[in-house]
Image (tube, rainbow, N blue to C red):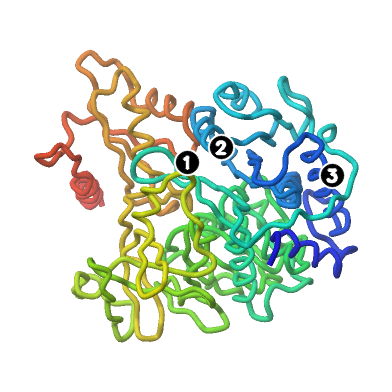
Amino acid sequence: MTNLVTNVAAAVEEHGDTTAIGFRGEETSYDEFWGQTGAFATALAERGIGEDDRIALYLPNVPPFLIAFHGTLRAGGVVVPMNPQYKSREISHLLGDSGARVVVTLSDLVPFVTEVRDETSVEHVVSIDGEAEGATTFESFLERGAPDVVDRADDDVAVQPYTSGTTGQPKGVQLTHENLASNATAAAKLVPDGIRPDDKQLGVLPLFHIYGMTVTMNAALFNGAAYYPMAEWDAQDAVSLVESEELTVFHGVPAMYNDVINQPNADEFDFSSVRLCGVGGSGIPTEVLRQFEDRYEPAVYEGYGLTETSPITHFNSPIDGRRVGSIGRTVPGVDSKVVADGFEDVSPVAEGPVDEEEADLDEITGEIVVSGPNVMKGYYGLPEANEETFTEADGTTWFHTGDVGYHDEDGFFYVVDREKHMIVTGGYNVYPREVEELLFEHEAVADAAVAGILDDRRGETVKAFVVPTPAADVTADELREYCLTNLAEYKHPREIEFVEELPRTTTGKVQKFKLREREETAEAETN
């Protein structure tokens, strides 16, 4: 295998005159798309940017993301995807740590880059939607040319997304050409007949996120299918696009399915063109899945994965059947198992899912670990984190997912808890420490803890428990606005409760389980 963009080149060779991208009524053929990636690769080369140089894509789901993504790979560079909801505070570390030399973004986001540019290695800022002070327009950045694809080794880094940890700053995940190409190929084969050239894939999952990048964008483009990106999620617009373009593949997070079934005209929606629905990012509530399938024709198949695994490790494939409540079987080419302390294998149960109220979870659960060609090369510049993340056993390198679960004799896996204490809200991961640190910077906050609480729509939502300073004169709305100004919208605490003190252990650690228990008790009393 060489540069993974050669998979796209092969599709161009076979399907050059068919649609690669459909966006807001305009279609771009594979030949046209390949020419655009060449112009971007040439632009990088003309500016002395090439092998191993980092290019940050600070964009929503729009065609220039695809052009810059594959143009960067064509030039031998490394893509650093960044959430367009991030503010300057959040992109500062990503740009500084990665050493990105180019940022491609929206004109409205250019000021956030400008604010931190002096602290980074950024040389060029490119605006895709018009002029902005301190930026070059996308059109003027591009150069004429159709360069060859730069040769890359299987273990050369292709994309470096960032994922938050339970402590410290977000970590750069080094995903190689083999990681991404192998997983996109595997994802395409999980569908009956595979992803076909006549398929039309809805592109509503964010492209800065590995799920959208691999399972929707690359799986489609590697196989000559058409990809229809949406810049932002809107249930009515998404269903309208499915209906008008007769889309055939729909991947989303649980909150999206929940939004669809809760629309006032949900019974009028037509999903008859869709042959596969996939869901991931977090576990989908059984009731949401049931209601969606009761209304519409396609079944919904759940999967599991992480940024560090490119992402898919498990999937309820329609080829092999599914088990509701399970994350599915391990995908072909990937190995997984459940291990206890000491890395001892945990035996499977006869058949899942088990009744978690009655089962002895301590006996049947452990940490889910995986290995395979999709597992990251390692965290960028963090050797100590890599030592903690990988275990060598019997000649195999195993990646620790940090998720607790069990498996059954039929090969289905089940997640019961998350060791990393992340909050999964609407498919996005939020780590409490980042929000807590921001709250501590507010002059009116003496102490704070952030936890995830149950939410019917998002699965979980972010709640902050705040101990105000004695002389504080601040409202919950003011603190929410403060967080919104400095963080992506999905990270801000939608609920803030002022408390006199936080429950702590004798060593000073906040006992967040007590905050959750109190929340559950209060909800039960209300109901």
Front residue of 273/8: it is: 8
Which amino acid does the dot numbered 3 rest on? Ala
Q: Are marks 2 and 1 in contact (CB under 8 Å)?
A: yes
Q: Residue at x 36, y 48 (%)?
A: 384
Q: In front of the other: label 2 or label 1?
A: 2
Front residue of 275/16: it is: 16
Distance between mark 1 and mark 3 Cα atoms: 35 Å
- Reading the image, the residue beneath label 2 is 85
> Where is residue 279 shown, x and y percent of the image?
53, 64
Q: Secondary structure at mark 3?
A: helix
Which of the two discs, 2 and 1, labels the residue nearer the N terminus?
Answer: 2
Which amino acid does the dot numbered 2 rest on? Gln
Q: In front of the other: label 2 or label 3?
A: 3
Q: Are marks 1 and 3 in contact (CB under 8 Å)?
A: no
Which quarter shows the N terminus?
bottom right
Quarter of the rendering containing residue 498: top left
On residue 39, which mark appears? 3
Q: Is residue 288 left or right of residue 408?
A: right
Q: Secondary structure at mark 2?
A: loop
Q: Measured along the vertical axis of the image, is residue 179 above or below residue 94?
A: below
Q: Is residue 57 visible?
A: no
Which amino acid does the dot numbered 1 rest on? Tyr
Distance between mark 2 and mark 3 Cα atoms: 28 Å
- Reading the image, the residue beneath label 1 is 490
Which of the two discs, 2 and 3, labels the residue nearer the N terminus?
Answer: 3
Q: Residue at x 83, y 43 (%)?
A: 42
Q: What is the crowding at mark 3: few (fewer than 14 residues within 10 Å), some, or many (at least 20)?
A: many
Q: In front of the other: label 1 or label 3?
A: 3
